[in-house]
Image (cartoon, helix red, strand yellow):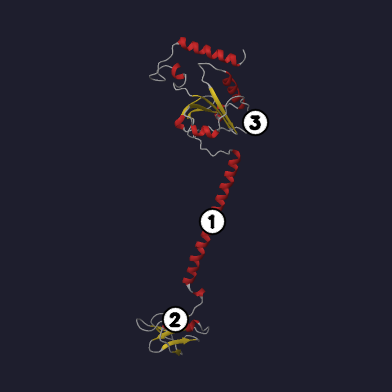
Amino acid sequence: MRFMKVPDFAEPWPAVEEDECKRRCLGNCSCLAYAYDSNIGCMFWADALIDVQKFSGVGVDLFIRLSASDLDDHRDKKLYIIIPVVSAFVCISVFIFVAWCWMVKNRKGGEANPRNVSWSSSTPIVFNDETEKVNTGDLPLFTFEMLATATDQFHESNLLGRGGFGPVYKGVLADGKTIAVKRLSADSGQGLQEFMNEVTVMSKLQHRNLVRLLGGCVEKQDKILIYEYMPNRSLDFCLFDGRHHPGQKALDWKKRFSIMRASRKASCISQGL
């Protein structure tokens, strides 16, 4: 307390510096207060503090011993310590919980589909694991990673079109060969039997008007067919007139009829008729 008239009945003690008074009072459990005056030295009080007055601008500094619980600043310091510790504990607990959930989710996702590949298509494949039921015979098999790399992770920029079977992507293999990758879609309504029918038919047929089947990919939930790439695009660009495809010359009906006969003949051969 600044600018104070010191209490009565002080116990003097000679000292040169004020710090000596503080050390002596803190070292004595009976010391209730102390003050320092350059002419007197240290003054200590062990009993009740009697006749204490505060002056304006004159007097000495009176230091009174109080318990820590009586000091507001000590309570504030405790809060400054407790709040960050509790906050840090809560944050660490939340982080650990989120990390645990993420690990569990990834573990389950890895069991369901071991490939970590991003898909751009909005129609993902949702087959069960039917790999053991698929027999492609002599049809060359491609790996999923090979096709994903060839199509830039099945990016929309490589999308050639969509049919009843599913989306078709343009791809380039490591050796530079361009291919068309047909991926079975969940929205197609077709299943394993339809997939096998197309594999059987296309692997046996060889016709100049039919695109050639190069291979397949059957891994876990993925059913994919690989065809030779048609640089002149699909047949509909030739069948429909310029209102649908400006700048494209439509086929005459004689050529259309010839194509239909060839397609019908190929279908009969595949069915053993």
Quick one: quadrant of the C terminus?
A: top right
* Corner quadrant of residue 108: top right
Q: Nearer the viewer, mark 1 or mark 3?
A: 3
Quick one: SS at disc 2? strand
Residue type beneath disc 3 = Glu
The residue labelled by disc 3 is 132
- Between residue 125 and residue 117, name the one nearer to us: 117
- Residue 50 visible, this orientation: no
Total numbered labels: 3
Residue type beneath disc 1 = Ile
Which badge, 2 or 1, comes first in the chain's sequence? 2
Indicate which disc residue 63 carries. Answer: 2
Which badge, 2 or 3, comes first in the chain's sequence? 2
Which badge, 1 or 3, comes first in the chain's sequence? 1
**Disc 3 residue crowd, few under 14, some 14–19, many 20+, Cα 10 Å:** few
- Between residue 123 and residue 149, name the one nearer to us: 149
The residue labelled by disc 1 is 92
Whole-angstrom CA distance, mark 1 to mark 3, is 46 Å
> How far from the left and from the top, in percent, is residue 21?
45, 84
> How far from the left and from the top, in percent, is residue 46?
50, 86
Residue in view at x 50 percent, y 62 percent:
84
> How far from the left and from the top, in percent, is residue 185?
55, 29
Q: Nearer the viewer, mark 2 or mark 3?
A: 3
Quick one: SS at disc 1? helix
Q: Is residue 83 above or below residue 150?
A: below
**Disc 1 residue crowd, few under 14, some 14–19, many 20+, Cα 10 Å:** few
Q: Is residue 103 above or below residue 225?
A: below
- Between residue 255 and residue 212, name the one nearer to us: 212
